[in-house]
Structures are given as C-alpha cells and as structure tokens.
Image (cartoon, grey):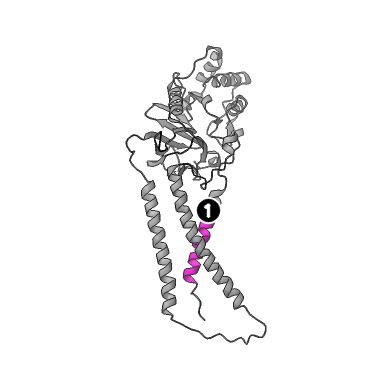
Amino acid sequence: MEFPRPALPLAALSRTSGFVVGALTAALPVAMYAADASSTQTPSIFDPRSTQTTEILAYSTLVLGICAVIFTVVTALIAYAVIRYRARPGDDGREPAQIYGSNPLELAWTVIPVVVVVILALVTARTIVDLQIDERPEGWMPVTAIGHQWWWEFHYPEFGFTTANELHIPLSDSTSGRPTFLTLESADVIHSFWIPRLAGKMDVIPNRTNHAWIAPLETGTYVGQCAEYCGTQHANMLLRVVVQTPEEFERWARAQQRPAVDDPKVADGRATFLKTACINCHTVRGTVATGRFGPDLTHLMSRATIGAGVATNTPANLRAWVQSPDHLKMGARMPAMGLGETDVDGVVDYLITLH
Ligand code: CUA
C-alpha cells in the first residue's frame, strides 16, 4: 500500500485553510457602529446588492466549493491513514515494505492539482476582466473619492459640489438609473475603498489614480469602511452609501448644489465660526470658509453621521465633537479650538442651520 507524498496535498490543504479563514473574516461585521438602524446591518459579501458584488460572490462560491472538496478529500485521507495505521500493542517495530515509483499515482497527484489551478486561474482572470474598468464608459456618473486620515471626500464633477463620508448614488438596474464610476485618490496614506454589498475592495493610493464602479440593484443605505490600515482611526474611517431612485438622487444633488443657508438668527455663531481656524480646513460654500483639509460643511445637516460615521449627527454629538474631537475620535486631525462655552454653543447653533 502506498500513500501520496505529502508535498502536494499539504500545499492544497494550507491553501484551503487560507480561503476558509478569508471567508470567515469576510463574513464578520466590518462596520460595527450603531449610529442608526440602517448601519447595524452586517455588510456581508454573501449578501450582494450590485452587479459586480453578485459576480464576485458567484466567483467566491466556486473557489470556496473547489477548495472545500479538496479540503474534505485530503482531511479524510489523513484521518484514514492516522487511524488505520496507528501504532498497536504487539507491533514488531519493523518497517513495512517500501514501494517507490507508481506512475499512475504520481501522475494523478500532479495532473489533478495542475488542472484545478488552471481552472481557478482562468475563472479569476475572467472575473477581473469583467470587473476592472479603467475608463469611464459613456453615460456613467463620475464621482471622485479621496481618502483622508480618517474620512472620505466625494466630488461630483457633473454637479459641481463636494460632500463627505456619505456617498449618494442612483440605482442602476435594468430599467432605470446609471452606474457610478469612481476615481479613487488619496490625500495622505494608503486607504482602501470597500462597501461589501456594493463594491469589492480597491486600494486608494497617494500619487496614483485607481478606479471602481458601482451598479447598485436595490435602493437603501449600505455601510462600508476603509479596508487598509491607515493610522490610529482606521477603524473609524467609515462610509455609507445611499442608493436612491434616479429622481430622488437628482433632488438630493440639486439640494447639494445650493450655497449654504445664511440664517440671520445665528449671525453670532456664524461670525465666531468664520473668525476661528475652522475655516482653514472646512468649506462652507458662499462664505470665506474655503479650507480643504476637512469635510465640506455646506450641507452638514444633510448627513446622518459625523466624524466619518463615529457618531450620529445630533446637536449634542456635534457639540461634543466641536468641543473636543479627541473625545469621540482619539487622534482625529481636527484640533479642539479651545472656545468658551458660549462660543461653542454659537458655532453649533450655526452648524445645525446648514441643511
Ligand atoms: Cu483609511 Cu484605513
């Protein structure tokens, strides 16, 4: 009796366990913030809602299936050998007959893995060719996403506005809407753009432009997050994607195009904001605040969260944030301005008028 040499089956086994670990971690909730009900969803790759994540799941299922078969066969053979040929009382200690060179067996354990690897390589190549698009196809909506430590900036060149952390895009199913074509850039270090149910991971790299696209098949709010360690608050570099019908999206975009509300009732707070260093980093369109380091605040209150998803956008959280960003998000690049209580109140009163 002869057994497969360990080299190939063991290599297959370790490859399989790699996939199993990968699959388990992919299924874990990646964005566990409980900012509101929609964000408590588990952003699982096994629950796709876009054209490309559906294809990624089909591909992953095939790969996992093949690996599961290999894993089962190899484990069963090992278990059989361990049990059938275990040491027994009364063994005479002599080696069994040694047999070398079985052509059929050696061919089998060489050819089968080669065929499996070739199949996996072909399927992988086909999936990459299907999903990787580097030029914006005619009619797709362009959006530029810029990764910052630790938040996301979104430009809508067709509409001429900028927003942060909450990406709105139109539905793109067979009957309506159009896909969104993303240009991905980084302002500082390497990040990774990932919305498990809508788009596979794509690295966001300084001095380089990458692309991704989203063709969402169902309206709703989807959560995602930076998937490349990028510093202290990597775990709180969350993003959410709101998929809307084309009409709803158009309405949202038109509202975002408008300059900021200028409510005379909060003139004091506005004045405090505009004479503080806030304006070096933040833009409020229609005012002297034109900073680009931090999120555009023109329509701050149209967003459900602050601090890239670290808290819900309520006046109380906003106040805590303005007073001491470190308290909610340790290491955040936004400094505490050291304003007095009255000034903080004024600034927050102003901010909550920015619908
Ligand atoms: Cu950005 Cu991790």
| Residue pictured at 41% horizontal, 74% vertical | 107
Give the percent coordinates (x, y) of residue 126.
Answer: 37, 53
Q: Is mark 1 within 8 Å of ligand 1?
A: no
Q: Residues within 10 Å of mark 1 (few under 14, many from 20)?
A: some
- Segment colored magenta: 5-23
Taking the magenta stretch, the answer to whether it contains residue 116 is no
> In which quadrant of the rendered view does residue 189 lie?
top left
Q: Position of residue 83 (x, y in %)?
A: 61, 75
Question: Observer-nearest residue: 64 or 347?
Answer: 64
Q: Is residue 8 magenta?
A: yes
Which residue is found at the position 51% from the left and 58% from the top?
18
The residue at which mark 1 appears reads as 23
Kindly tell me whether residue 238 is visible in this rendering: no
Instruction: Identify residue type, mark 1.
Output: Ala
| Residue at image location 57% in from the left, 43% down from the top | 42
Q: Is residue 141 visible in this depiction of the protein?
A: yes
Q: Which residue is nearer to you in this view: 130 or 148?
A: 130
Give the residue at the far front of this rendering: 175
Horizontal side of 175 relative to 32 (left or right) equals: left
Q: Is residue 37 left or right of residue 167?
A: right
